[in-house]
Amino acid sequence: MDLTFTSQQAAFRDELRGWLADNPPDPEPTDGGDDAHFAWRRDWQRRLYDAGWAAPSWPAEYGGRGATPSESAIYFEEMGRARVPFSANTLGLLLGGPTLMRWGTPEQKERYLPPILSAEEIWCQGFSEPDAGSDLASLKTRAVKDGEEWVVSGQKVWTSGAQYSKWCMLVARTDADVAKHKGLTYFLMDMEQDAVQVRPLRQITGEAEFNELFIEEARIPDANVVGGVGNGWTVALTTLMNERAGLGFALQIRLRQLLDDLIAKAGERGLLEDPLYADALAELHVRCESLRLMAWKGLTDTERYGQPGPEGSLVKWLWSDTNQRLTELAVDIVGPEALTAGTDWSYEFLRARGNTIEGGTTEVLKNIVAERVLGLPRLKAAA
Amino acid sequence: MDFGLTDDQREIQRTARELLSERSKPERVREHAEAATTDRDLWRELSELGWPGIAVAEENGGQGLGRIELSILCEELGRTLAPVPFLPSVLAATLIEHAGSPEQRERWLPGLASGELTGALGSSSDGSAALVIAAPEAGVIVLVDEDGGGRVLEPGQADVTPIASVDSTRSAGRVSGAEDAGEPLPGDVASGIDRALVAVSAELVGVCERALEMTVAYVKERKQFGVPVGSYQAVSHRCAQMLLETEKARSTAAFAAWAADAEPGRLAEAAAMAKSAASDAGREVTASAIQAHGGIAFTWEADVHWLYKRAQLDAALLGGAKLHRARLAAILADHAGAPAVG
């Protein structure tokens, strides 16, 4: 056991830290709305791209640095620590790129990977549907072959960044006559067509981070099938496996920073001497640190043994639950300011409600832990 | 960054697990717990293997290995609830080694390391400690007090009255009249206690692991309404929660064991995190184990209650979760916590 970074890892961290110190992003725009905010993030990704920092975990042949999973975790930790924005094309970088690298044809890789990296083409994810949330494989969006094209109709939801996207990672049903997991196909759908309508989905915080997609006879060339017809579920799992791997480290550092801010706030108000608040803050500290230890342990085990295991579900569960507890305690410590619309604390408080739902509800995560880690029998679901 | 055990450490773990699965079977633990006796044969065997001195320096008669190796043994002994005074003995040795004078170390450590002598460690107030695990059989007793001081006592220098704790897998006693008895420990008692906390936390991790394993095995087998009860989410989600608590305790205990040897500057924080997480986990996980076992767990014949009882004693030992969170809050107030790794 050695819980320090190797000299190679430390060198990677120091190089990135140095670059971030010399190249901070522009200040977050205060007006101009979502478009200005997105432009700011796109500009940030371009700068990362120019310096070779857009996706260090990508292999060098695709413009990355071939960083190890540990270095990739360090990358996200440092990004979180420096409080820089998420890259505009985060979904392309973290999900789409790696999925194509695993399943794409040489032509697809050559065509699609470079503009993901440079933020020229933004990607979004068309998986969830109004009636297919946790039970994703029950999705209903249909794709029917018509010559060299597929004709797609259906509805998708929780599609973040859809209004800025060129490509959508779309999972649709291409065969209704086989078992539900088997009849799915993974497509790259061009968002720039009239048959695809994007409607912002206003959420609990008042902003519209996500969208709904209404798809009516959209056309997708057959060349845009990824991983073969009928193989969509397996390809989608690759995307989902990548979803948490990197981002988790950035989220966890943000949690740490939020807790440090809250401890500072509690100090200002003299609440660190109050045993009830002291106990609650210390408990959050324990959770935060054990979360980080568990995440690093999972990662280093992955480096040793290959594929990430279902233990990652514990980390996401603990992170989401801790962030909710933290922001609830913040309301008590910060007081009315945290209940005033538009403040950072009120945003964090409301946004945290989504944490235990997005990317796998806590209930589904508990099922995964019970079934795949503990080996408990699963209750038969309705057909 | 590497959380894995070395080959040697894995070998220690494997040997310990094999030995204890033979020598500390539930039937044997029950026999000793019901008779309120120590398993002297097992103690002799562990002593011959050098276990009590695993973390004691070689010049003091031990094996000179680290806190990680000691934690491995504590975890395995906790898993099997071995009815031997291993934990109390290594806690006493830890305090004497880290806070004792050269004379005290020379006098007590060789015996504690070889297992000829067993020790006990208690928290005292005005010279009395109401419940000290393994005190009646101890050849040396260390008492730490609320003001951060510590004393080392021989039997006979204070009154030791045997008492029955709820956990009869180990003996216990009340120590009184020790206010000026024995000798003060002149060194850094606080960091000795922090190292002791690491060992207690490791034992609790072992208790949690075993409670979870027994529960998972049981709910897979036990049927009600025609299906295994473990297929109900009310039960399976409880098991998942038990795993989460166990992993929180395991990760913080591992960090603390590592920090004790490799990064002593963070030991106080790490030990407080480990003991608060392990105390909570120990109590919650073993309580959940009883609930998931249902009525059978409430009977004397079931084994799961021994884990529950051991967890209570260990959770309280050297302060419970709330006390260590209060310590942690004081540390946080002094300086915003740097991340645990890197």
Image (cartoon, grey):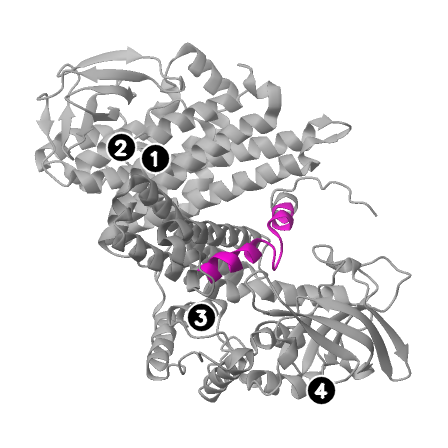
Q: Magenta part mainly helix, strand or loop?
A: helix
Mark 3, chain letter?
Answer: A
Q: Visible in this render: residue A160?
A: yes
Residue B206 pos. (x, y %)? 45, 35
- Tell me which residue sits at (66%, 66%) in the image: A158
Q: Name the residue under label 2.
A: B91
The residue singled out by tag 1 in the image is B200
Labels 3 and 2 positioned on one and the same chain: no
Q: Nearer the viewer, mark 3 or mark 2?
A: 3
Q: Where is residue B247 in the image (x, y as percent from the top left)?
A: 47, 45
* Part of the protein shown in magenta: A346-368
Chain letter of the residue beneath label 4 in the structure image: A
Residue B55 shows up from this direction: no
Q: Do discs 1 and 3 share a chain?
A: no
Q: Which residue is under mark 3? A: A71
Q: Is label 2 in a helix, a strand or a loop?
A: helix
Report the side of B206 relative to A266 (left or right). Answer: right
Could you give the CA–CA distance between mark 3 and mark 2, rounded to whole angstroms?
Answer: 39 Å
- In terms of secondary structure, where does tag 4 sit? helix
Q: Disc 1: which chain?
A: B
| Residue under label 4 | A107
What numbered label is drawn on residue A260?
none
Give the mark, 3 or 4, whose residue is nearer the N terminus: 3
Q: Please name the amino acid that badge 4 sits on.
A: Glu
What's the chain of the residue with tag 2?
A: B
Q: Does the magenta stretch include residue A356?
A: yes
Label 1: element kind = helix
